[in-house]
Image (spheres, rainbow, N blue to C red):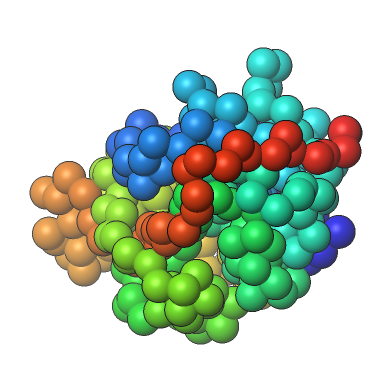
Amino acid sequence: MGSESIVYDVIGREYAQYRRPDERIAAAIEAALGDACSVANVGAGTGSYEPLDREVVAVEPSGIMLAQRPAGAARAVQASAENLPFDDASFDACLAILTVHHWADWRAGIAEMLRVARRRVVVLTWDPHHSGFWLYRDYFPDALELDRRIFPLVEDLAQELGGADIRVVPVPHDCTDGFFGAYWRRPDAYLDDGVRSAISTFSRLHNVEERIDTLRRDIESGIWAERNAGVPALRELDTGYRLVVAQRMYDDREEAPVPRMGGV
């Protein structure tokens, strides 16, 4: 099923509790999808950011993640991004949310999204050129090195997509989606085992508890506040997340085929 299935079969058991879609990020994704009526959500996980007012089919390799999809969620198929079980031009749009870096072959996955999408492809990802934020700088510099290795360059993504618009996605100070950069103004959150269990980056690092203990001491002593004096005044922060949006050429006179899919 691919490397993303292995990762989330290990860390994804309480994923839905901590990874709840943020309405401001959702609005940016909705805007990027434009007028697409049908959407394939590739690497869909538990269903975060799936549009409620469009026809959606989810693709997810991990059975554990699929089991956490809520009642009433979109139809889902267990499959990998590199081998989408759909006919050509089956959907108006393909969507991939913070998942490309988990794919065994991201270029093959992008090629599959291009094959399946008639109008546009939308990818939410992280920019390896970004310097990160205080959690990388002061506690997990190896996480920055890791993320820079596993995340494709946004320019490379745009090139594979045949040209794309790259949009900054600032993270709100009270972001409800617990990805790595979500708690930049709430350092105490990273002390929570459950929070970290829903962030794949921590599963790839060594000596996590030791460094979390250092963060705990720095919060209690006031060192964190001294180092990050301007952070509590900010309402949002660019921590490197980007939307890559590609328009597709299609003939609007042609009727889209009915998606071919398996069940789960």
Depth check: give the residue in front, 204 or 42.
42
Which percent across, then down, holds residue 105? 71, 74
Depth check: give the residue in front, 50 or 173.
50
Which percent across, then down, holds residue 164? 38, 67
Would residue 175 be visible to someone looking at this image?
no
Q: Residue at x 36, y 40 (%)?
A: 34
Depth check: give the residue in front, 89 or 219.
89
Report the side of 24 relative to 68 (left or right). Answer: left
The quadrant the N terminus occupies is bottom right
| Corner quadrant of residue 28 | top left
Report the side of 124 relative to 69 (left or right). Answer: left
Would residue 243 be visible to someone looking at this image?
yes
Report the side of 57 relative to 94 (left or right). Answer: right
| Corner quadrant of residue 201 | bottom right
Which percent across, then down, holds residue 129? 36, 81
Which percent across, then down, holds residue 229? 14, 61
Vertical comparison of 204 with 26: above or below: below
Vertical comparison of 172 with 243: above or below: above
Q: Residue at x 72, y 44 (%)?
A: 59
Q: Residue at x 61, y 32 (%)?
A: 56
| Corner quadrant of residue 106 | bottom right
Vertical comparison of 130 with 261: above or below: below
